[in-house]
Image: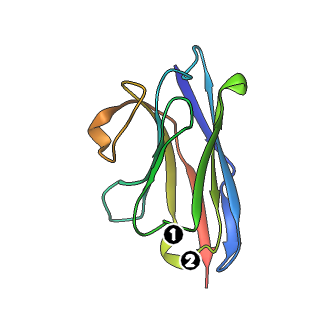
Amino acid sequence: VQLQASGGGLVQAGGSLRLSCAASGRTFSNNAVGWFRQAPGKERESVGVISWKGASTLYADSVEGRFTISRKNAENTVYLQMNSLKPEDTAVYYCASARGPYGGMSVSGYIYWGQGTLVTVSS
């Protein structure tokens, strides 16, 4: 399965962006999907994950209450709604498909990765 993340861009602090992750080649409706980010000079970190049917989500403490992950399996797409953005949210954001229907916060649990989309938040 190929994943394509899109929707990144430049936004002022306090603003919002919605990222999309579209799958092609095969469906990922049976898999959890995670969002990760990597800032310059830092390791890739988990932002959050959504289960295969969308019934459960997990978020990193740093984004809890500001970011929301959702999915539309009929469209093979997962979304990351980002509100109240802060300069420290600046990073390349990646989506990834987990090995099974539920995923954790570890990079190692994900097998298919998108190419990333850059989010820049100005102060």
117 or 27: nearer the viewer: 27
Quick check: marks 1 and 2 in contact, CB under 8 Å? yes
| Residue 50 visible somewhere in the drawing | yes
| Residue 36 visible somewhere in the drawing | no
79 or 102: nearer the viewer: 102
Q: Position of residue 75 (x, y in %)?
A: 72, 26
User: Which element carries disc 1, helix, strand or loop?
Assistant: helix
Q: Is residue 50 above or below residue 26?
A: below
The residue drawn where x is 48% and y is 75% is: 88
The tag on residue 22 is none
Q: Amino acid at mark 2?
A: Lys
Q: Position of residue 11 (x, y in %)?
A: 69, 71
Q: Amino acid at mark 1?
A: Asp
Q: Which residue is mark 1?
A: 89
Seen in the image, is 99 located left or right of residue 89? left
The residue drawn where x is 62% and y is 44% is: 70
The tag on residue 86 is 2
Q: CA distance from mark 1 to mark 2?
A: 5 Å
Seen in the image, is 45 located left or right of residue 16? left
Q: Position of residue 108 (x, y in %)?
A: 27, 37
Q: Is residue 99 above or below residue 122?
A: above
User: Which element carries disc 2, helix, strand or loop?
Assistant: loop
The residue drawn where x is 69% and y is 50% is: 7
The residue drawn where x is 58% and y is 68% is: 66
